[in-house]
Amino acid sequence: MWTEIIDAINAHQRFIISAHTNPDCDALGSELGLALHLQRLGKTVSILNSDPMPPTYAFIDPDGLVQTYSATAHRQTIADANAIIVVDASGGWTRLGRVGNALADAHKPSLCIDHHPNSVKYTDVAVVDPTAAATGELIVELVEAMGGEISPKMAVALYTAIVTDTGNFRFSSTDARTHRITAKLLEAGAQPAKIYNQLYEQNSLGRVKLEGYTLQNIALTHGGRTAYSMLTLEVLERFGVASSDLDSFSGLSQKIKGVDVSVFLVELPRRRVKISLRSNGSVPVNQIAAKFGGGGHVPAAGATADGTLETVLSNVLIEVEKLL
Ligand SMILES: [Mn+2]
């Protein structure tokens, strides 16, 4: 399955790697694992994303390889590139945000490596495997298919990609393949306790208290099958927490017995709302996210919509109800 990707990697020298907007750990860890692999092959690599790296994840990028795209600063980088590799985003160039437009306009040879279902083919070559629990798994398999070695830095980035995208190996996507790949990453130097500590035990007091506030304000609807909560800009400011630093909040209400779907909304500047959806697997929340221009997986998906918290909430709940 890797032949075309490997041929393209061997044929080119200067690469740009990118991923979806609001990059999660699978997107970032896959970008870094792949970039470090390409660097070991003597290639020149730039990782360009539309949105900045959340501070929580910065530990997977000790050398600062991940850059936030700027039209002026990166014009030449894009012009000089021979090929583009997109990871963890197969919905089309628009899933990449601003940098996606620039990359699409560059008309360079393009590759995609992803595990999202319902992919759209928009690159010249694509390996999309929805049976993989994380794109990070696919990067490990690519490195192996090329006879490459996993360095300790690659192991940390790729382990973090997999551990976060599987919800610490608890989502139904987790299988024997996930654990086999993960075992190799442990052998290559990834330390689970250290990574867990970096991911989940570095919160500010304000963020932990905001979690308490969010729990306090969970509401149920649809006979207890849907839980929802939301945070205003004013509340985020009061607790001193950035909207990009709320990854684990979307699943908080999945703890409640009988809840099939969790809706978590965060107010953004300029009347925008970030929608995060979780389900126990019985409701494909990626179908709901798609209605709002987003994407994801059956148990976890997201989107960004225009409107106030109240209007977006009622629109999302209407879509949830259709699928219950
Ligand atoms: Mn992913």
Image: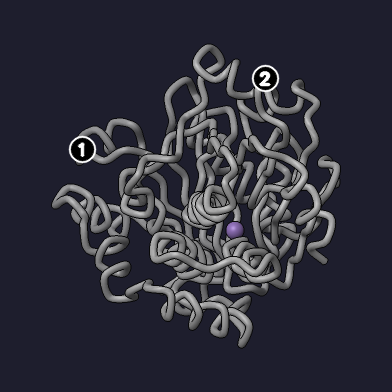
Residue at position x 72%, y 36% in the image = 83
Give the colouring mode of the picture.
Answer: one colour
- Please, what is the three-letter code of the amino acid marked with disc 2? Ala
Q: Nearer the viewer, residue 192 or 233?
A: 192
Q: Which residue is mark 2?
A: 79
Query: Which of these two is toward me, 308 or 300?
Result: 300
The residue that mark 1 highlights is: 240
Taking the image in four quarters, ligand 1 sits in the one at: bottom right
Q: Secondary structure at mark 1?
A: loop
Residue at point 71%, 33% (across, down): 94
The local crowd at label 2, few if under 14, some if 14 to 19, many if 20 or more residues have their Cα within 10 Å, is: few
**In the structure shown, which secondary structural element does the residue marked by tag 2 occupy?**
helix
Q: CA distance from mark 1 to mark 2?
A: 40 Å
Quarter of the picture containing the C terminus is bottom right
Can I make out residue 148 in this image?
A: yes
Residue 223 appears in the rendering: no
Q: Position of residue 135 (x, y in %)?
A: 62, 61
In the image, taking residue 203 as reference, residue 24 lies left or right, namely right
Q: Quadrant of residue 82?
A: top right
Name the residue: 53% across, 12% down. Answer: 72
In the rendered structure, which amino acid carries the disc numbered 1?
Answer: Gly
Which numbered dot is residue 131? none
Say which of marks 1 and 2 sits in front.
2
Among the 4 quarters of the image, the one containing residue 145: bottom right
- Residue at the image position 55 percent from the left and 20 percent from the top: 74
